[in-house]
Image: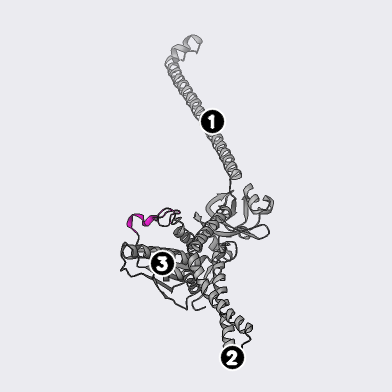
Amino acid sequence: MMKPLTPENFLQIHSDTLRSLIKENKRLGKELRNTRKASEVKAADITYSEKEFRDKERAAISAVIESEKKYRSLFDSGPNPIFVVDRQTFEIFDANPMSETVYGYTRDELIGRCCTDICVMGEEHRNATPAQMNIFFGNCEESRRIQHYKKGKKPFYVKVKTCPITYKGRKAFILAVTDLTGMMEKEAQLIQANKLTALGEMSAGIAHELNQPLTAIKLGSEFLKMMMEEKRQTDQQDLSEVIHEISDQVDRASQIINRLRAFGRKPDFIKKAKERDVNACVRNALAIIAHQLISENITVRFDSDEDISPVPAPENLLEQVIFNLISNARDALVQKKTADSESVLMIDIRSFQEGNQVAIVISDTGTGIPADIRDKIFDPFFTTKEVGKGMGISLSIVYGIVKDLNGDIEVQTEEGKGTAFKLTFPSAGPPGK
C-alpha cells in the first residue's frame, strides 16, 4: 500500500527529480542570459553599423555639395566662355557668364540652343551627322584657330578645347573657348611690321624697278611735246608706237604699285578664305624681290605644275610665306658668297600635287642651318644676324601662317650645302580646277 503524499515526505520521495529540475533550470537560465547578451551585442553592432553608414552618407552628400559648389564657382568665374553640351543632340545644357559677354546672348537664349549655331568646331563639322560629331566629342580634343559667330552672325576666331563628361546622368561634353581676337590683332601687326621691314629693305630695288617705266614714259612724252612745239609732221605709225609704248609703261608702273600695295596690305583674318593659285602667289613674290636677287647674281628656277589645285587662304598670306622663305634663302646665299666667292647661288622652287594636298618646295644652295639651332629657327625673335639686321620673326611668321591655313612645314638642311623648306596645304578643289 502506497504511503499518502504529504509535504513532509515529498522532498524525500522526489529529491533526485527536483535536483535534476533545478540543475536544468539553472542551465536554461544561463543560456537565456547568454542569448540576451548576444542579442544586445548584435543590436549594438547593428546600431553602430547604421550610425557609421549614416555618417558616411552624410559625408558623401557634403562632398558632393562641396564639389558642386566648387564646380559652379569655377564655372561662373571662368575668364573664358564655357558651355556644357549634350553629346547626342548638341543642345546647350549650361553656359557661364563669360559666354554671355563674348557671344552677346543671354544665358536663357543660350540654354536649349544647338551649339552648332554658334560653336562650330570647324567647317568640316558644320554638316556632320550626330554620330560623327559624337565620335569627335567623345575624346578630349583641342582645335586650331577656327571661326565662331557672335549674336548677329558676327564672326570671330577662337581656340576650342572639348572634354567628355556626364552631366545630370546624361552624356555631355565641356566646350571651353578661348577668344583669339586680341592675339590675332597683335599677330596681324607683327606680320605687317615684317612686311614694312621687307619693303624698306627693298626700297632701292623698288625705286629702280619703277624708274624704268617712268623713264620710258618721260622720253615718250618729251618726244610728243617736241613734235607739237616744233609743229613737225610725224608719221602716224611712229606716233602710234610712241603712244602705245607710253600706255604699256603706265600699265607696267601700275602693276608694280598695285603689287606692292597688295603685298603691304594688312592681313584680315576675319574675311573668308578664297581659292588662291599657288603658282600665281610664287610669281607675285618673285616679282617683288626680283631686283634684289638679280643684283646678287642669284639664279631662280621655278618648276611649276600648272594643273595643281587651288589653296584656300586669305589674301596675301601665301605671298607672305613664299616671300619670307625666298628672302631667307637669299640671305643664306649672300652669306655663303661672302665666305666663298666661287659659290653657285641658286634658288629652286617647285609646286606639285601630292594627293589631296598642294606642295611647294623652296630650296637653296646656301650655308645650311647648324645642327645646334635647327630646333629654334621657328622661335619668335630668334636670329643669327647682327643687331639691327633682322628682327628674327620671318620664319616664325611663316610657321604661324602655315599652321593657321591647316598646312604643314618640313625642313631639310645640311650645313654648308643648303636648305629646303617643304610646304603642304589642303586643296580647295580637284586638280586642274
What predominant SS class does the magenta segment belong to? Answer: loop
What residue does disc 1 label?
51
- Indicate the quadrant where residue 375 lies: bottom left
Instruction: Say if 27 sits above or below 77 in the image.
Output: above
Q: Which mark is residue 422?
A: 3
First in sequence: mark 2 vs mark 1: 1
* 344 left or right of 165 in image: left
Q: CA distance from mark 2 to mark 3?
A: 56 Å
Residue range of the region highlighted in magenta in the rendering: 369-387
* 64 left or right of 300 in image: right
Q: CA distance from mark 2 to mark 1?
A: 119 Å
- Indicate the quadrant where residue 304 lies: bottom left
- Rendering coords of residue 93 (x, y %): 62, 52
First in sequence: mark 3 vs mark 1: 1
**Amino acid identity at mark 3:** Lys
The residue depicted at 48 percent of the width and 12 percent of the height is 10
Magenta span includes 371: yes
Of circles 2 and 3, the one toward us is 2
Q: CA distance from mark 3 to mark 1?
A: 71 Å
Instruction: Say if 245 sits above or below 83 in the image.
Output: below
The residue depicted at 69 percent of the width and 51 percent of the height is 108
Mark 2 residue element: loop
Of circles 2 and 1, the one toward us is 2
What residue does disc 2 label?
235
Q: Is residue 260 visible?
A: yes
